[in-house]
């Protein structure tokens, strides 16, 4: 009885070791998990709602820098005008001295569209958000027009934004600061 019991305890253990070895070997032959699945985050499916939360809560745009040559409140033109304040996140700042034709993935530019009286709340926030793979034909910009209260007027591959900003395509669709 004693011997039998010992065998019974050894056998499943040996089986488990062999099983673990086989699993480990099998694991080695598995293809690596593609980055898109491994590092899934909010930007895999960008939405204006996520963008709004990002620039107001996670990384408030009012704490960001501005383009060195577009400081404070500046005159603006239709459909944006008549005044505007433009903020750039840290990833845009990184490209100020080192631009190779496109801003970095995750770059965000927030433009407060202001009326004549700049003390009043913005009419809208028009935002450009660089999301790798989102729209390769147009430099992967996600466009949004959102009210300061978070109401989404338009979002995504907005034709109006793209058709006009394409005039600045060589400068990654940005008009006001030349990289
Ligand atoms: C008819 C042309 C036109 C349309 C449409 C347009 N823009 Fe612009 N946008 C401009 C011009 C010109 C500037 C720079 C001068 C200014 O502020 O008026 C600008 C500036 C900006 C900036 C600041 C960065 C830069 O390029 O200088 C952002 C951000 C922006 N626009 C976002 C948007 C979004 C988002 C939309 C669509 C919802 C949009 N724009 C639609 C012409 C346009």
Image (tube, grey):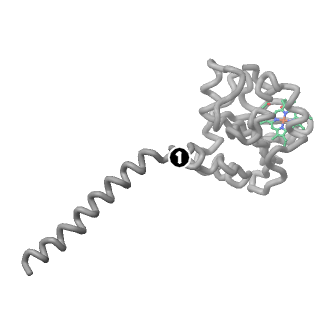
Q: Residue at x 62, y 19 (%)?
A: 98
Quadrant into which the C terminus falls: top right
Q: Is residue 88 above or below residue 51?
A: above
Q: Quadrant of ligand 1?
A: top right
Q: Nearer the viewer, residue 171 or 77?
A: 171
Residue 64 drawn at (x, y percent):
62, 36
Residue 42 drawn at (x, y percent):
62, 50
Quadrant into which the N terminus falls: bottom left
Residue 152 drawn at (x, y percent):
79, 54
Query: From this viewpoint, is residue 111 visible?
Result: no
Q: Nearer the viewer, residue 175 or 167?
A: 167
Q: Residue at x 32, y 53 (%)?
A: 21
Q: Nearer the viewer, residue 64 or 73?
A: 64
For residue 83, what is the image quadrant?
top right
Judge left or right: residue 5 versus residue 160.
left
Q: Secondary structure at mark 1?
A: loop
Residue 131 drawn at (x, y percent):
69, 40
Instruction: Write down the residue under mark 1.
Output: 33
Q: Is residue 14 above or below residue 50?
A: below
Q: Is residue 38 above or below residue 63?
A: below
Q: Nearer the viewer, residue 128 or 124?
A: 128
For residue 29, what is the image quadrant?
top left
Q: Residue at x 65, y 41 (%)?
A: 62
Judge left or right: residue 90 versus residue 112.
left
Judge left or right: residue 55 versus residue 22.
right
């Amino acid at each position: 009885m004693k011997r039998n019991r010992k065998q019974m305890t050894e056998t499943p253990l040996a089986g488990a070791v062999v099983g673990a070895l086989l699993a480990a070997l099998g694991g080695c032959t598995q293809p690596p998990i593609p980055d898109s699945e491994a590092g899934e985050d909010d930007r895999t499916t960008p939405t204006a709602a996520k963008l709004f939360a990002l620039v107001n809560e996670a990384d408030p745009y009012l704490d960001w820098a501005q383009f060195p040559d577009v400081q404070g409140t500046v005159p603006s033109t239709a459909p944006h005008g008549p005044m505007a304040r433009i903020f750039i996140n840290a990833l845009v700042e990184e490209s100020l001295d080192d631009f190779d034709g496109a801003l970095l993935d995750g770059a965000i530019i927030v433009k407060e569209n202001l009326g004549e009286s700049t003390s009043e709340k913005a009419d809208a926030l028009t935002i450009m958000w660089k999301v790798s793979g989102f729209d390769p034909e147009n430099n992967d910009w996600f466009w949004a027009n959102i009210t300061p209260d978070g109401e989404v007027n338009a979002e995504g591959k907005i034709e109006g934004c793209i058709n006009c900003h394409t005039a600045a395509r060589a400068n990654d669709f940005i008009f006001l600061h030349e990289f």
